[in-house]
Image (cartoon, helix red, strand yellow):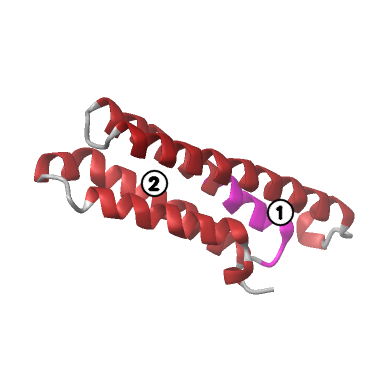
Amino acid sequence: MKLEDLEIYNLSMTLSDKVWEYVIKWEYFAKDTVGKQWVRAADSVSANISEGFGRNTYRDSRSFYYIARGSLYESKTWLDKAKRRKLIPEEDYKALYSEHNILGYKLNNFIKTQTLLMNQKPKTDSEK
């Protein structure tokens, strides 16, 4: 399996591209405060998924998937701030909010699967 085959990776890449497309159009102050933070958080989701995918053990990988989930929640907070500060329209907020929730659900299931695999596989000396 390749990284590009992971649905959560592809969803996170699409989400971060959408965030970028909004933020890049904002005026300097909004971009410098909310925008940069939101882009970093959204970009961090796919970055941590890819780093976890490249690790040698399920335990190592799972740590990065947890970080990805945390970044997703941070991205959702910045989305809320963008809406409250009227930086994005309500209908776009709802669509992005839904995408965050779908990715969160799928990422949680992926983490559960990794945990099951971790518990089924015989532990190496470094994992004991």
| Rendered residue at 27%/35% (across/down) | 89
| Rendered residue at 35%/30% (across/down) | 80
- Magenta region: 56-67
Location of residue 87 in the rendering, given as x and y in whole percent from the top left corner: 22, 36
Q: Of the residues tagged 2 and 1, which is closer to the observer? A: 2
Q: Nearer the viewer, residue 6 or 36?
A: 6
Q: Nearer the viewer, residue 66 or 107?
A: 107
Is residue 64 magenta-colored? yes
> Which residue is under mark 1?
59
Location of residue 84 in the rendering, given as x and y in whole percent from the top left corner: 28, 25
Q: Is residue 18 left or right of residue 84?
A: right
Location of residue 121 in the rendering, given as x and y in whole percent from the top left corner: 87, 59
Vertical placement of residue 107 versus 79, above or below: below
Residue 27, quarter of picture: top left
For mark 1, give the secondary structure.
Answer: helix
Q: Which mark is residue 41?
A: 2
| Rendered residue at 72%/62% (across/down) | 57
For mark 2, give the secondary structure.
Answer: helix
Residue at the left extreme?
Answer: 28
Separation of disc 2 and disc 1 at Cα?
23 Å
Type of amino acid under label 1: Arg
| Rendered residue at 37%/58% (across/down) | 17
